Amino acid sequence: MNKKLTKNLILRLAGVATCSLATFYSASSWSKENTPEYKSDYKQDIKVTQLLKTQTTSIGQPINFATINKPEVTAVKVEIPPGKETGWHKHPHPGYAYIIQGTLTLELERNQKFTFKPGSTFVEVVGTLHNGKNLGNEPVILIAFFTAEAGQPFAIPANPK
């Protein structure tokens, strides 16, 4: 498979995953009144709300799609109880997340912190050690889609230096 075809396939899979997520949860309380409606080619009376459009990860890394011979999309639901954390890890490939409930605090090695509240969408950091924490009183629930080589893990446990 050539590089251009592979990139197009990955972009299409990510788009399908994102659209599926948006369609599945469109009736829930995720939508915000000030979220712009996305212009789509769906039939009349179908509302599409753009949740995310970016060229960088949550910490500003440019998004790069590697050449993948056997692309695979993994969708996960992550639930972090109050006071718990994911443990330090990194992602070898792009991941796209949506916070359903709770507030996620993303901690990086150099004590940088980012906070994501319900309705937040973000692109996971790639190749950067981080730890997801729930500092709140309710569970954090998020949905994430990862694009990777078939059979590869979406997260790799690691210890900060």
Image (cartoon, rainbow, N blue to C red):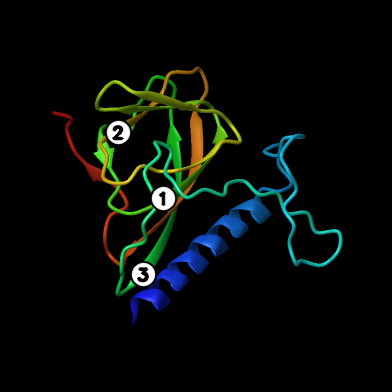
Quarter the C terminus occupies: top left
Q: Are marks 1 and 3 in contact (CB under 8 Å)?
A: no
* On screen, residue 122 above or below 6: above
Mark 1 falls on what kind of element? strand
Distance (Cα) linking label 3 and label 2: 25 Å
Position of residue 124 measured from the top left corner of the image (x, y, whole percent): 40, 43
Question: Which residue bears the numbered disc 3?
Answer: 71
Q: Quadrant of residue 33?
A: top right
Give how far across and how far down residue 142 sits, in percent: 50, 40
Label 1 and label 3: CA atoms lie apart by 13 Å
Numbered badge on residue 116: none
Q: Are marks 3 and 2 in contact (CB under 8 Å)?
A: no
* Residue 130 marker: 2
Q: Residues within 10 Å of mark 3 (few under 14, many from 20)?
A: some
The residue wearing badge 1 is 95
Residue type, numbered disc 2: His
Q: Nearer the viewer, residue 136 or 18?
A: 18
**Earlier residue among tags 3 and 2:** 3
Which sits earlier in the primary sequence, circle 1 or circle 2?
1
Q: Which residue is pictured at 44% across the width and 41% down the height?
A: 78
Rate crowding at label 2 as few (under 14), some (14 to 19) or many (20 or more) other CA atoms within 10 Å: many
Q: Is residue 52 left or right of residue 42?
A: left
N-term-proximal mark, 1 vs 3: 3
Amino acid at pointer 1 = Gly
Find out whether the residues at labels 1 and 2 contact each other: C-beta distance under 8 Å. Answer: no
The three-letter amino acid code for the residue at tag 3 is: Pro
List the single residue furthest toward the left: 161
Q: Cα distance, mark 1 to mark 2?
A: 14 Å
